[in-house]
Structures are given as structure tokens and as C-alpha cells.
Amino acid sequence: MGQLLAACVVRRLHDDPGKVGTTAIDKGPVEGPVKVGTLGLYADVQADRRHHGGESQAVYAYADEDAAWWASELGRDIPPGYFGENIRVAGLEVSNAIVGTRWLIGGSVELEVTKPRTPCMTFARWIGEDGWVRRFSDARRLGTYLRVVRTGSISAGDAVEVVHIPEGAPTILDLYDGVKG
């Protein structure tokens, strides 16, 4: 069983020199309960809806264990939301989760693993590290997108229970390697 450490939504939009001209990657934890609908956490937004959001990418999850690894690698804190994630969890397989795995958060919200995050130049500009896209990709600590199977509310501290793992399905990294290859 895992735990939801933080539910994060956009704090503010930032100008970005990329094609969209703005980014919503700046996310931070919500105090108290936050509603989760079919398109993600209430009060969140995606600036580039061509590559982010929608039903199959409604929620982006990142593991606290991977964030701690990056904090050590980069020599700086990686607080919840810093990688643009909507939920920071602990005690779960996230970056190599099996596609179709379902998580029940707080006994009400059910999410299903769909696909890996693909790092982009907006993310690289936000982090400010040379060679970031390749470095993040090579580390294979991508996090996962999830679709919302059942709506409700979540709060930091909620239990995250794995309620279904499909047999024979690929992992997030299998999908990512197929995309890269």
C-alpha cells in the first residue's frame, strides 16, 4: 500500500519561448481535499493540450522515491509539483508500473495507469539543466499518466491501494522504449 503525499495543481502560468508561448508546469500542493474529475484535478490546467491532459493523461503521478533520487543527483530539493506532477506518491511502483494497473486513492478515486511521461523542452527549460531531456529519459524515472476511472476527492495522507494489475500487459518503460526505439 502506498500513500498520497501531495495533490498538486497549477500555481501560475509562466511565459515560455516554446510554440505554445506559456507553460502550466508550475504546480504546487493543495491544502485539504481536492476534487478529481474525468479530466484531472479541479483548479489544474494544461497550457499545451495537444501533448498534455485529456482523459488518458488526466493525472500525472510521480514517486517520492524518484524525486529523492533526483534531489541527490541535482543537489537541490524536488518538492511535490516541481516536475509538473499532479500527485506525489510514496511506496508504489510508478515509473515502471504495468499499464492498466488501477489505484484506489482515499477509498474513493480510482485511477488507471495509461502511459509514460515523455520529457520535452518546456520541462528542460523549467528545470534549467543542460541536456535535461536526455538525462531524464536515460534515468528512466519518468512517472506515469493515469486516467480517472472513478471521480471523487483526494487529500494528502490518503492511502493508495493497488486494486488491479492486469496480466501480460506492458510496463510504462516498455511503452517508452517502444516510443524511443
Image (cartoon, grey):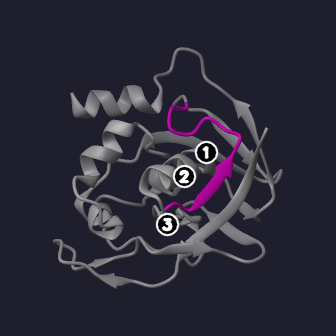
- The residue at 45%/53% (across/down) is 57
Residue 65, compared with residue 42, is above or below; it is: above
Q: Quadrant of the N terminus?
A: top right
Q: CA distance from mark 1 to mark 2?
A: 5 Å
* Tag shown at residue 160: none
Kind of residue at disc 1? Glu
Q: Circle 2 sits in a helix, a strand or a loop, which is it? A: helix
Residue matched to label 3: 82
Q: CA distance from mark 3 to mark 2?
A: 9 Å
> On the picture, is 110 further left or further right than 26?
right
Question: Decide: marks 1, 2 in contact (CB < 8 A)?
Answer: yes
Residue matched to label 2: 67
- The first of marks 3 and 2 along the sequence is 2
Question: Decide: marks 3, 1 in contact (CB < 8 A)?
Answer: no
Kind of residue at disc 2? Ala
As for residue 13 lying within the magenta part, the answer is: no
- The residue at 43%/40% (across/down) is 115
The picture quadrant where one finds residue 16 is: bottom left
Residue matched to label 1: 65
Q: Dot 2: few (<14), some (14–19), or many (≥20) neighbours within 10 Å?
A: many
Residue 16, compared with residue 77, is above or below; it is: below
| Rendering coords of residue 55 (x, y %) | 47, 54
Q: Main secondary structure of the magenta part?
A: loop
Q: Circle 3 sits in a helix, a strand or a loop, which is it? A: loop
Residue 33, compared with residue 93, is above or below; it is: below
Kind of residue at disc 3? Tyr
| Rendering coords of residue 37 (x, y %) | 62, 64
As for residue 91 lying within the magenta part, the answer is: yes
> On the picture, is 21 further left or further right than 12?
left
Q: CA distance from mark 3 to mark 1?
A: 14 Å
- Numbered range of the magenta stretch: 85-97
| Rendering coords of residue 82 (x, y %) | 49, 66
